[in-house]
Image (spheres, rainbow, N blue to C red):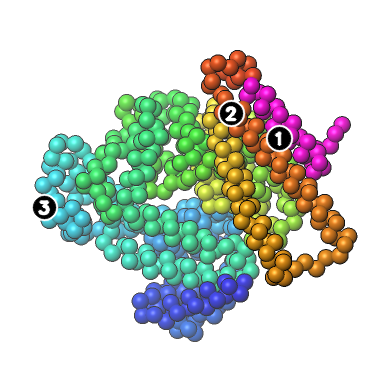
Amino acid sequence: MSVLRTIVHSSRALVTTAKDAARFREIMSVFMTHGFGWVVAQLRLRRELQIEHEGEDLGMAALTSPDTGKRLVKALTQLGPTWVKFGQILSTRSDILPEPIIVELASLQDDVEHVPTEDIHAQLEHNLGKDWRKHFESFEDEPLASASIGQVHRAVLVTGEPVVLKIQRPDIRAKIESDVNILHTTAGYLEEAFEEAHIMDLTGMATDFAKSLAQELDYTVEANNMERFRRNFEGHEEIKIPVVHGHLSNGQVLTMEFIAGKKFEKVIAEGTPPEDLAKAYFDVAYKMLFIDGFFHGDLHPGNVLLTEDKRLALLDCGMVGRLAPSRKDKVVDIIHAVLNEDLELLARTFYSLAIPQGPVDYAAFEQDCIAVAEQYLIGVPLSQIQIGELFSRLVEGAARHSVRMPTDFTMMFKAILTTEGLAKAIAPNVDPVELAKPFIEQMVMERYSPERLKQVAMRDFLAFSEMARSVPTTVPMLLEHLDSGKLRFGVNDETLELQHKAADLRVGRMIRAALSISLIVCGTGVIGVDALPVALWGIPWLSLVFWGLALLLNATLLRKQGILQPE
């Protein structure tokens, strides 16, 4: 906590700088105007910022009154794009905010005016050169869409190909960077003033938000995302990803293929079966989430279109999520626990993913997890299980135990929730779990494939090898320190004897573990050798023998540790 205070106090220099002081004062004044004067007062900033109080001060009741969400939305909307986007992110954090405020924040929309035509032309001239028009047969000055960071215009290349240009608003980067600095500082003040804010890790959220916005401000990131999606869906003719014209794109201008398509509600009204549409949508979303580990972070109805040739087009790929293979393994464990109603495994897996913010009573944590899971799993038909809703409630419950989930997982849960919500809206009878089964089975097959087992075994073998190589240097150093008196132990004879026994056990376990890994590596290494007789699924008998010996060694090790009890 002292480190946090040091950071917060050092960041107060921001308040007195000419660059941000006026904007900081404006932000605090807006919150006070909308009834959050009590919160600002707790930060002890009014005198430092010379804020004149205007508007009704509702005191602490401002945080719990029925219209808190509405007033917060008004304040964030008035403050502009940075704060609107932060509010949109907060709308996904049901673990830290009550449901009424979440509902209001989910309604936040960018309310921005169009950029003047001359400013758009100036941006194109700055980024594509003074002769930018030579690349286009035509360019529409009337925007197709206008958002807080950029504006979209239609155009036609000299080759006759229709395109859209995403053009960043002039000077928006400097405004957002200033607001992000202020947001981060404000989060520090809140954590210093309120223990709840520290548990919520507001500064961590502000840091993650800053990284996300930095990516949105760099259109090359979105271009790279689209290229990666295109590679992931190579061979899937039912998916359409816009092609980026790299020679007409950079960090502030993104020129991409124009895709003509219709929103789901329109094609359903025209007679397309909603169940077919929902299945196609789930296939795309689940492949990204469960197989690729690289997924669209905002797959709402506005970002998915159905083209004339019945393909799904994915738009606006600036916000994405990622899951490393080790994280995907945890997802397999969670879904396995859900499908088998193994509530203890579900609680353990969730806790293994969690980031504790303080001391945690695991027994209470597990009890709460099980209580939440029972509501969604026990006695509920598979077709009615809402995985996204279950995950959201579990994350919300974890916060009560000073535990938060990693950002990549909360983003994944939000993506699942969005996917389920859209599919249920267009096809209420759709079964998300049934549609997810093929992808879950593929995840399991990949997890236990010979190639994956070989990778894991080799990684563990290298780790043990590295440890073994360090023994010849570390042991003499240890003995030298002991001999010179630099390293001393203050233990009695009984304790020393126990330590010797414990050391012997550890050495035995290490030897067994090393032998077990060697057997696994040997068993995996002989797969594919033609001369060996095959037992099952193309796996040689020799591999099964090696693996069986490794399993026997591990079972012996677990029994000695008291984890497995002989019958």
Is 34 located above or below residue 377 in the figure? below
Which of the two discs, 2 and 3, labels the residue nearer the N terminus? 3
The span shown in magenta is: 542-567
Q: Position of residue 229 (x, y in %)?
A: 38, 38
Q: CA distance from mark 1 to mark 3?
A: 64 Å
- At 38% across and 75% down in the image, what residue appears? 20
Packing grade of label 2 (10 A; few <14, some 14-19, many >=20) is: many
Q: Are marks 1 and 3 in contact (CB under 8 Å)?
A: no
Q: Which mark is residue 318?
A: none
Q: Secondary structure at mark 1?
A: loop
Q: Secondary structure at mark 2?
A: helix
Q: Are marks 2 and 1 in contact (CB under 8 Å)?
A: no
Q: Is residue 558 magenta?
A: yes
Q: Is residue 41 left or right of residue 182?
A: right
Q: Residue furthest right?
A: 494
Closest to the observer, 115 or 537: 537
Disc 2 marks a residue whose amino acid type is: Thr
Residue located beneath label 1 in the image: 341
Residue located beneath label 2 in the image: 524
Q: Is residue 37 magenta?
A: no
Closest to the observer, 29 or 163: 163
Q: Nearer the viewer, mark 2 or mark 1?
A: 2
